[in-house]
């Protein structure tokens, strides 16, 4: 009887040993109520690997608020409420190609040296797979943009872009977390913004 009890105890202890690494890994991704983080710095190699996986969805919508599309797209020679879109990180720059009615415009966004990362518990009652609240996330990239096609004439002098990747997730960063994007362009002859969904990462 004693031998059997000792064997059962050893089996239970061994099972606990195997369970601990999984639990430790899960807790590393656990989020907590009231979580808030914002920081700016050079992207790590892991963060860059996630950026390379991100793909833009097939549609870009012009942000108009309550304005007419022509008034909301200063510097865009061919204005539409939405465009077919293709884009991803090519080398060290995002290449975003917009198409509508046989016309094309391409924006090139060089990957900047710094990334601003923002994560927060927005207290909406949703729970993340890793445990704790489902966090809202943003990755923000800023730099100078160049353009061709129906964007070309509006890129006069230094013109800036702000690209925001938006998503939800736990305390760990994953390419699958980011599901939406927003792009703002501002310059002497350009002022417009687009938004849309991100495709499944590759």
Image: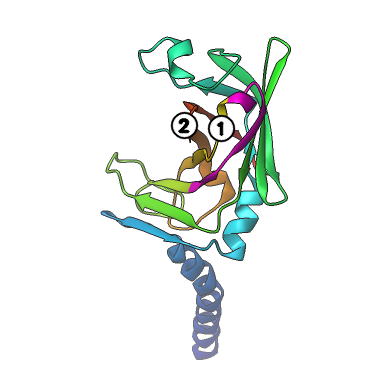
User: Is residue 144 in the magenta section?
Assistant: yes
Vertical position of residue 47 compared to residue 105: above or below: below
User: Is residue 154 in the magenta section?
Assistant: no
Q: Secondary structure at mark 1?
A: loop
Q: Considering the whole magenta stretch, tell me its main secondary structure.
A: strand
Q: Residue drawn 51% across and 35% down?
A: 181
Q: Residue drawn 30% across and 41% down?
A: 125
Vertical position of residue 20 compared to residue 108: above or below: below
- The residue under label 2 is 188
Residue 54: x %, y % from top left: 63, 44
Mark 1 or mark 2, earlier in chain: 1
Q: Residue drawn 53% across and 78% down?
A: 17
Q: How many marks?
A: 2
Q: Which residues are magenta?
A: 141-153
Q: Secondary structure at mark 2?
A: loop
Q: Is residue 30 left or right of residue 62?
A: left
């Amino acid at each position: 009887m004693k031998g059997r009890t000792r064997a059962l105890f050893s089996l239970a202890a061994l099972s606990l040993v195997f369970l601990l690494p999984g639990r430790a890994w899960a807790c590393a991704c656990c989020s907590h109520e009231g979580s808030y983080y914002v920081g700016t710095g050079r992207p790590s190699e892991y963060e860059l690997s996630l950026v390379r996986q991100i793909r833009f969805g097939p549609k870009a919508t012009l942000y108009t608020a309550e304005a007419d599309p022509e008034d909301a797209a200063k510097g865009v020679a061919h204005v539409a409420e939405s465009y077919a879109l293709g884009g991803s990180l090519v080398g060290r720059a995002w290449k975003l190609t917009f198409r509508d009615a046989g016309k094309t415009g391409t924006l090139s966004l060089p990957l900047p040296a710094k990334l601003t990362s923002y994560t927060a518990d927005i207290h909406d009652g949703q729970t993340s797979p890793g445990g704790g609240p489902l966090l809202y996330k943003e990755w923000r990239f800023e730099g100078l943009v160049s353009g061709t096609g129906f964007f070309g004439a509006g890129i006069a002098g230094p013109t800036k872009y702000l690209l925001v990747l938006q998503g939800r997730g736990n305390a760990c960063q994953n390419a699958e977390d980011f599901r939406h994007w927003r792009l703002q362009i501002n310059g002497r002859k350009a002022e417009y913004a687009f938004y849309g969904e991100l495709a499944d990462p590759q």
